[in-house]
Every structure is written in structure tokens, then in C-alpha cells.
Image (cartoon, coloured by chain):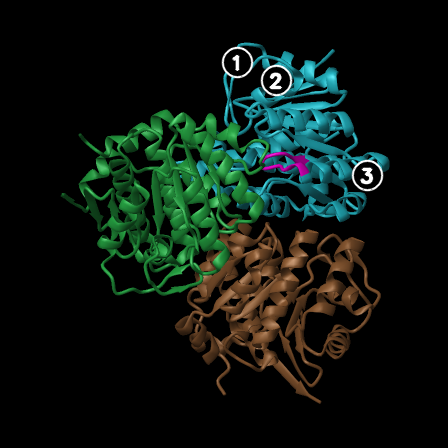
Chain colours: A cyan, B brown, C green
Amino acid sequence: MNLFQLVNEVREKNPLVHNITNVVVTNFTANGLLAIGASPVMAYAREETANMARISGALVLNIGTLSETEVESMILAGKAANEKGIPVVFDPVGAGATPFRTEMSSKILKEVKISIIRGNAAEVAVITGEKWEIKGVDAGSGDGSIVELAKKAAGLFGCTVVITGKDDVITDGVTTHIVENGHELLTKVTGTGCLLSSVIAAFAALEKDSVEAAGTAVSAYGIAAEKAAATTADKGPGSFQIEFLDQLSKISKEDEAFAKIKTTKE
Amino acid sequence: MNLFQLVNEVREKNPLVHNITNVVVTNFTANGLLAIGASPVMAYAREETANMARISGALVLNIGTLSETEVESMILAGKAANEKGIPVVFDPVGAGATPFRTEMSSKILKEVKISIIRGNAAEVAVITGEKWEIKGVDAGSGDGSIVELAKKAAGLFGCTVVITGKDDVITDGVTTHIVENGHELLTKVTGTGCLLSSVIAAFAALEKDSVEAAGTAVSAYGIAAEKAAATTADKGPGSFQIEFLDQLSKISKEDEAFAKIKTTKE
Amino acid sequence: MNLFQLVNEVREKNPLVHNITNVVVTNFTANGLLAIGASPVMAYAREETANMARISGALVLNIGTLSETEVESMILAGKAANEKGIPVVFDPVGAGATPFRTEMSSKILKEVKISIIRGNAAEVAVITGEKWEIKGVDAGSGDGSIVELAKKAAGLFGCTVVITGKDDVITDGVTTHIVENGHELLTKVTGTGCLLSSVIAAFAALEKDSVEAAGTAVSAYGIAAEKAAATTADKGPGSFQIEFLDQLSKISKEDEAFAKIKTTKE
């Protein structure tokens, strides 16, 4: 299969992605989803999250600025999505930075069947119960193998795990993609990890195979970043952010030529 | 009267626009209002919304990411504005997408005297009780006449109704403007409808005739979009968004030459 | 000491700045902090704000869209920061615009030991109990001397006070800096005052002397604005905003040559 065909499908079918996400990235997430051709919707109230999730193609749960009320909403939405077989992407932003985030992550993972987890190594380590150093919401450095960590998490939660960093690892424990696309400037714009989680959700809305959906999304996203950096890296993160949205709006199956994906199977 | 004179007046008098709006668009709304020369303020707490509304030139109630608490704040602010004769613009984002949004829209419309409603056809149909297809917060397609729908809503709520889409309809049931300004790229940037509601509020703060205020705002807004698209359409939605803010900051009464407004009276 | 050395230190040491701020500016604040090299984190929940404050280099309390719940979180975070000697920057956005904001400002100032207050003249006047005219969240005009006002506030709260406006005043009552850097376009982009408060916090995380930290931050910030305006002033506030982020990412100790700081000591 031409995986990047999925990029064109998202643009043609405009899957509705329901985001319960943090207040820092809502605008950027909505604009990024629009740029790739998806339809974003944000809805947080307990009274409506389950209903909104049911009419969506995918659901994103992002704990970046969560409150206890919001966790309730996430669980209601997550259970509703589970009942209808709608994929749920979980982004454990800053898990480990405070006990509250770690506990709420566990609670969500216990109550909701997650399809795809996307985080940095430190966050995934925390929710998996592995030792890793963390500082705020940025990834710390660790000494374990990131691929091993991703596989362990995938086994523990029975889902696909995406660990982003210098290289990105996508695995369900059987198929593993290492994606070498992307650019360091992504770390200089807030919410690029959060937006990626939502882009993965848009792809997962149309492709049942989570590893393939996530692998394609991560690679396409990285290619857009590379193209944006090519013309803005010397200008700065403001210009990069805008050019990145522009490039996301142009990414297509033709860009598969730039994909750097190494796949192994067990 | 030279309607576009109002564009210059907004820039000279900097009307204070109080927005109780959704978390996705707050930043873009504030920057857009600043660009046209208005003074934005956001205030959500029950303890202060009425007081803030009283010192404002106009109030915007936008339900894009509402919670039950926020609805209370909206009603308190709305009633305070009503008592002082301050115009209230209502944006029923995603009404119909969930029962909660539909119910909360009804509640607000029952408790607060609205001056201007701004939505897409699907949203206005829902609050008016007409059948229309809806998908998330995007407008669905319908088979009824949009002008008829707008007039029906205007009659039902006794206010001016703005339905935006390919063409925009502004009517109070007597005077009807059809505005053909605007650009498709507006649909690729999140919050352009929400910002328009707030821009209409800024104009309504200075012009008592709601149909004229809204008609001028919609046309001027569309002209800024056309100018922005002229230089950024081939770049993408990121560049368009920034250029659009730039163009909003330059719009003036001279731009009336570009206005495409057809007016009918009954 | 070469004060602008601090600009380089921020970029090297990436201090973690915990922001409890308003929903309008979260994204811009995070991107601005990333641009100068700091690590932003936003956390609002009562359950975690104290923990997050304890691991941060500085804490920012900004009341731009506060609720009563958020004030509780601010006080919990503020007390935790106080216990560990972590500097706390307070931004009383719109104090005076409503009684609620004025009362909550007083409450925060009573419960938390603030290191640096940053506001416009009207806001600082309100919290200091001086008469000043205010309109929304914009600064009104007053007839008192701004330097005197800043010194009075510094004496009353026993901290450093930064009043921004055409010129900026930074004083602890003994050392006073008048900074003439900056550009009027900063008033056309929402959140530039809020972001400055957070940038001051990043500098205060590394420099114990609050007047020096704030003076350097204010000057460096103003220089970035001047550079951004040099190429975007005729384009508009959209372009300025992006170029400003770019320039913040390039500011360095070499820019001390552009600093316009007048210092007096008593």
C-alpha cells in the first residue's frame, strides 16, 4: 500500500477530530488540523463531551493543563469513543512533572482503552513505570533504549506507542517504525508535539492499522517541518511556525519520496 | 451616509469589546480587534462579567467551548448589557452538534436580549428550529434558502441575523444586505467566524442601526481577506492568517470602493 | 557586570518558568519564552500548582482572565514558591477595571510575597491605592509622576516594580532604571505586556537582584521589538508579531549596545 495515500485521504474526507486539549495549544492545534485537511472540534463540558466524541472520527486526550473536572470529561468522552470503536489518542504532557499529572494519566489509562499514546521518552517512561529524568514538560535524557521503552509501553497498554525525539519510534510491539524526518526547530514552537498527537488522530480516523496511521502521520509531519525549516531556519521560530502551517497544507502523497522510515517486524 | 466611515470611527474611538468566547480563538480575536482599532477585553468570572459588560461598548457571547459555569457568566453579562442598552452579539458555535450546545443556546436566547446573531446556516437553523445538516462546528449543506432562514431567525428573535458562508446575509427582516466579499481561505484559519462576530460587535458599539453596523463589518472584513489572499493564497493558511491581521489594520473608508453589497428593503 | 550577559545565560540554562496566566496569551507566552531560551510550563490545577512551582526557576501570576478557583491555585503556587525562595512575578492585568480584579489582586498581594510587579501605570496605581483613570485592560492617562508611583508601590509591597508605557520604569525604591527601548507596535499585539512579565521571570530565575534582572529583561525585550519594527512596521501587527518572536530568539549580550537605560540611585 502507498501509505502516503492516507495524506490525500485526510484532505479529501476531512475527518472530524475531537480534541480535549490544553489551553496553550488549542489555536495552533485547530489551525494545524485545518491545514492538513481535517475538521477540528474542541469540546470540554461534561454535558457534551461524550456526544461530541460519538460523532467524531477520532478523539484526542491531552493533559497539558488539566483539571480534575477536565479529567472527568476526558473519561466520559473516552468511554463513549470506546463504545463506538472510535480511536483515542492520549498525550500525557508533563506526566511525571507533578504527582497529579502522573495519577491522572494512570486514571485515564485505566478507564479508557487507548489506541495510540504519543509522548516524549520521559513521559512514556513515567506512565510505564520506568525510571527517566524529567524537567517540566520537556523530555529529559535517559539511558535506556527508547525502542525498548516504546515496546514495553505498547505491551503494557496493548496499544500503539509513539515516542518522539531526535528520531521517532512508532510501535505496537510487533511492527516498529523508526522515523528520521523532522527538524530541531519543532522544539522551539510550543505545541508541536500536541499538534502531532492530533494529526495522528486524524490519520487514525481513516486507517484502522494504528502503527501505519501513526507512522505515516509522523513522517509526513516531519517532512513538512523539514520543508518549513529549509526557508525559515535562519529567520527564527516565529517564521518557522507560520511556514510550517503553510507546508502542512501542501503535504501530499507525492512527499512519500522524502519519507525516512525504517521498519522492523517481530 | 458613507457606511465605511464607521471603519475609521472604530479606529479613532477604540470601542471596548467584552468577549466571553471560546479558548481556541481568544488570542486571534484579541489581535484581530486590536488590528481594526478596537480595545478587546476578555472576562469570564461570574464575579466580574456583569461589571465588565457595563463599561464596554459591546458584548460578545460565543459558545465555542462553553461550560455550564460560563453560560451563567454569559447570562449575567448579557443582562447587565441589556440594562444599559449595550449591544450583545451572539455566536452559537456548533449549535446542533450536541444537545448541550443547542440547549445552552436556547437558554441564552431566552434570558438575554440579543442585538445580532452571527453564525453559519446550520447553526442559525438549529437555534431557529429549522432542519439543517450539521457536522461538528462546520456548516452543513441545506436546501432551504439562506435568506429566508435569516429572515425567519430575525423575526423569531427580534434582532439582526448574520449568516456567513460563500455569500453573507445580513438582515433584520426589513433591510437585507447580501455581501459577496470574502475569501475561501477564511475557512482554513480557525476562529475567523468568531473574530467576525467580535468585529461586528466593535462596529455595533458605535452604530445603533444593527443591520448597517453588521453589513459594513462583514464587507470590510471580507475585503481585508481578499487583499490578504491576493498575496498569500499560494503560500498557505499560515501566511494568510498573518497577512489578514496586517490587512485588517489597514482597512479604511477608502476601501468602500471594493464593497460588494446588494441591499433590498421590504 | 555586563548585564546583558544574563540574556546569554537564559539561553544556556533554560530556566523553567511556571505561568498561571490568562487564556488569551498562553500560546504567545510559551512561544516567547521558548524564543528567549527559557522553558515554559503552564499548570493551573489546585492539585499540582504548588508542586509545579517548587520545581520551577520562577513563577508568574497573571490575573488577565482569572476565576476564583484560579486565584486559589495562584496562592497555593505562590506560597510554595515563597517557601523555596523562588521569585514570583505578579501581573495585575486589568486591576481596577472591575472590583473583582482589584480585590483578587489585593488578596494575592496579601497572601504571597511578590518579587516583581509588572503592570501599566493604571494597574499599579489601583493596587497601590492611588487615583488613576482606567479603561478595560489598557492603561489610562494619569497626572502623577510614573516614577513616583513606581517607588510608592515598591515601598508598599517591598518589591521591585516595573511600570511599562512609553518609557519603562523599574525600581525597588533605591535603584531606578528608566528604559527607553521598545516600540509602539507592542501595543497592537495582545499579550506583549503579559509575555514581558514572563520574560522578566525567566531573567529573575537566574539573577537574584530583581531590579537588575527586570531592567535587563525590559531593555532586551524592547530592543527585540525595535528590530522587529524596523522591518515590519509598514506591514502591520500580524507580521510584527512573528518577526518579534524571531528577534527574541536572536537577542544576545551583543545587543547591549542598543540598550537605552538611565539609572539613578538614592
Which chain does the residue under circle 2 lie in?
A: A
Left or right of A263 on screen, residue C139? left
Q: Is residue C82 visible?
A: yes
C5 horizontally vs A6: left or right: left
Q: Check residue A80 in the rendering and tell me which mark sits there, or answer none.
A: 3
Q: Could you give the CA–CA distance between mark 1 and mark 2, rounded to whole angstroms?
A: 9 Å
Instruction: Kindly indicate the quadrant of the structure image that contains residue B11.
Output: bottom left
Question: Relative to residue C225, is residue B105 depicted above or below?
Answer: below
> Which residues are drawn in magenta?
A61-68
> Label 1 lies in what chain?
A
Q: CA distance from mark 3 to mark 1?
A: 36 Å
Residue type at mark 3? Ala
Measure the alpha-carbon separation of dots 2 and 3.
Answer: 28 Å
Task: Looking at the picture, tell me which residue is in the foreground, A171 or C13.
Answer: C13
Q: Which residue is mark 2?
A: A125
Question: In the image, residue B80 lies at what x, y percent?
Answer: 59, 69
Q: How many marks?
A: 3
Q: Quadrant of the C terminus of chain B?
A: bottom right
Question: Which residue is under mark 1?
Answer: A142
Identify which amino acid the numbered label 2 is placed on.
Answer: Ala
Give the x, y percent position of residue B8: 43, 75
| Marks 1 and 2 close (CB-CB < 8 Å) | yes
Q: Chain of mark 3?
A: A
